[in-house]
Image (tube, helix red, strand yellow):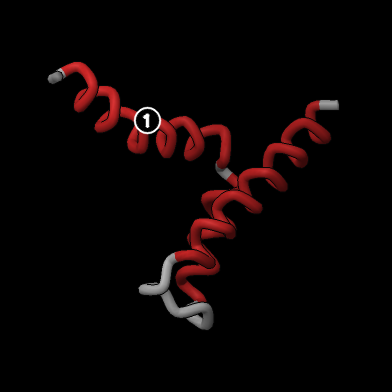
Amino acid sequence: MLFQLYGGGWAIAFGVYLTFWMRDRTTPMTDPGSWLVLLLASCFWPIVLPISVITELLPRWRAGRSR
């Protein structure tokens, strides 16, 4: 069951990261380093996902509090 949970999270994280990566026009799709980072970020999603959310939401939260 733990493997299924991890695998499901990996698939979701990979899909989300791939979507963001495909929208980024500055990164070439043929760069092996980019694919490696994408795969590693997906493999370590229990660590990377909370950090990604914090880095996206913290500036918005701080901007809202300063008003």
Q: Position of residue 31 (x, y in %)?
A: 47, 79
Up the image or down, 15 lies above or below 22; here it is above
Q: Which quadrant: the N terminus?
A: top right
Q: Residue at x 65, y 52 (%)?
A: 15
Secondary element at image label 1: helix
Q: Judge left or right: residue 12 versus residue 16.
A: right
Up the image or down, 26 lies above or below 47; here it is below
Identity, as a three-letter code, of the amino acid under mark 1:
Ile
Task: Residue lying at the far bottom in this picture: please name it.
Answer: 30
Q: Judge left or right: residue 62 versus residue 31.
A: left
Q: Position of residue 50 (x, y in %)?
A: 47, 30
Up the image or down, 2 lies above or below 12; here it is above
Q: Residue at x 43, y 66 (%)?
A: 24
Q: Residue at x 54, y 68 (%)?
A: 35
Q: Position of residue 2 (x, y in %)?
A: 79, 27
Q: Quadrant of residue 25?
A: bottom left
Q: Residue at x 33, y 36 (%)?
A: 55
Q: Quadrant of residue 67?
A: top left
Q: Nearer the viewer, residue 62 or 67?
A: 67
Label 1 crowd (10 A; few <14 / some 14-19 / many >=20): few
Up the image or down, 12 lies above or below 2; here it is below
